[in-house]
Image: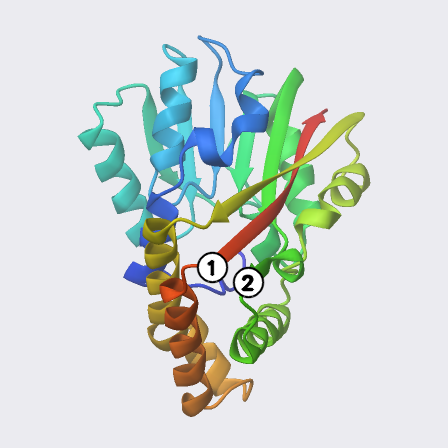
């Protein structure tokens, strides 16, 4: 198995964010390329909310959802069961060593995965291996340094600097979105179509939800533990960052965007 470390960990505040994701808000660039009967591999499936949507779109085709965290796989199974998905199975797997034959899938999908890997090009090579000729590998990753917000707050700037430091200490690349095209070309794909999209949080309900989960995550998740152990922040710093997230959420002028790069890759 890979030695890569997932920067966010699997704290409830992280899973709340992941469970909000749908194919519509997180994989719209891929949807027109899906068709009933396709076989699809979802790499880094997380709690399975995107997986369930994709399964509905390719039914009666089979979906295989993989992740390397057993607790998350249990959450994915529960999501699929709760939504009555019958054409998907969930398995533990490493993105660098997918346990499937060459040319096994029509579609290989990875959402917010490559930014956490020490060798994203190697993972894309492996995804290309299991994708059939004529199929597509689809990847979408956010770009942390390109995120922006209003009103400005020096403690949110400190939060960003802390996150970038922790992620890069893990060997990951938080500015993944802008690099997807380059990584896909290095992985040897014959055709790559690049695009971008954003999440925007600006309504009172959106700010409350997004600000609350980050206010909690910066104090209690694996990210907080890594920041403290690595010397990237003190506990008092994390408290200030958490308070800054709550100030942002409460401000009626609050606005925040998460830009993401996307690639559709043909073997």
Q: Residue 53: percent from the left, percent from the top?
A: 37, 26
- Rendered residue at 54%/38% (across/down): 110
- Secondary structure at badge 2 equals strand
Q: What residue lies at 33% left-to-right and 74% top-to-bottom?
A: 220
Reply above or below: 217 against 61. Answer: below
Residues packed near mark 2 inside 10 Å, few (<14), some (14 to 19) or many (20 plus): few
Q: Earlier in the sequence, mark 2 or mark 1?
A: 2
Alpha-carbon neighbours of circle 1 within 10 Å: few (<14), some, or many (≥20)?
Answer: few
The quadrant holding residue 248 is bottom left
Numbered mark located on residue 253 in the image: 1
Q: Which residue is mark 2?
A: 150
Residue closer to the observer: 190 or 112:
112
Tell me residue 58's x, y (percent): 43, 15
Q: Are marks 2 and 1 in contact (CB under 8 Å)?
A: yes
Visible in this render: residue 70?
A: no
Task: Decide: is 32 above or below 203.
Answer: above
Question: Which quadrant would the C terminus be assigned to in this image?
Answer: top right
Q: How many marks?
A: 2
| Circle 1: element type | loop
> Quick check: 38 left or right of 90?
right
Distance between mark 2 and mark 1 Cα atoms: 7 Å
Q: Is residue 13 above or below residue 38?
A: below
């Amino acid at each position: 198995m890979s030695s890569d470390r997932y920067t966010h960990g699997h704290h409830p505040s992280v899973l709340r964010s992941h469970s909000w994701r749908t194919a519509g808000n997180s994989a719209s660039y891929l949807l027109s390329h899906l068709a009933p009967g396709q076989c699809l591999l979802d790499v880094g499936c997380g709690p399975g909310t995107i997986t369930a949507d994709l399964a509905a779109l390719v039914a009666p085709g089979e979906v295989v959802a993989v992740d390397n965290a057993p607790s998350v796989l249990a959450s994915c199974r529960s999501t699929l069961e709760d939504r009555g998905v019958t054409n998907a199975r969930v398995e533990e797997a490493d993105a660098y060593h997918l346990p499937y034959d060459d040319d096994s899938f029509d579609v290989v999908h990875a959402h917010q995965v490559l930014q956490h890997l020490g060798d994203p090009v190697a993972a894309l090579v492996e995804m290309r291996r299991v994708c059939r000729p004529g199929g597509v590998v689809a990847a979408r990753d956010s770009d942390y340094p390109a995120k922006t917000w209003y009103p400005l707050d020096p403690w949110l700037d400190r939060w960003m600097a802390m996150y970038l430091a922790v992620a890069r200490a893990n060997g990951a690349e938080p500015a993944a979105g802008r690099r997807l095209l380059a990584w896909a070309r290095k992985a040897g794909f014959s055709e790559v179509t690049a695009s971008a999209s954003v999440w925007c949080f600006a309504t009172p309900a959106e700010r409350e939800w997004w600000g609350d989960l980050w206010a909690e995550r910066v104090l209690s998740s694996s990210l907080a533990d890594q920041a403290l152990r690595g010397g990237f922040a003190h506990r008092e710093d994390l408290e200030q960052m958490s308070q800054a997230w709550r100030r942002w959420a409460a401000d009626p002028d609050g606005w925040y965007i998460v830009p993401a790069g996307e690639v559709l890759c043909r073997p």
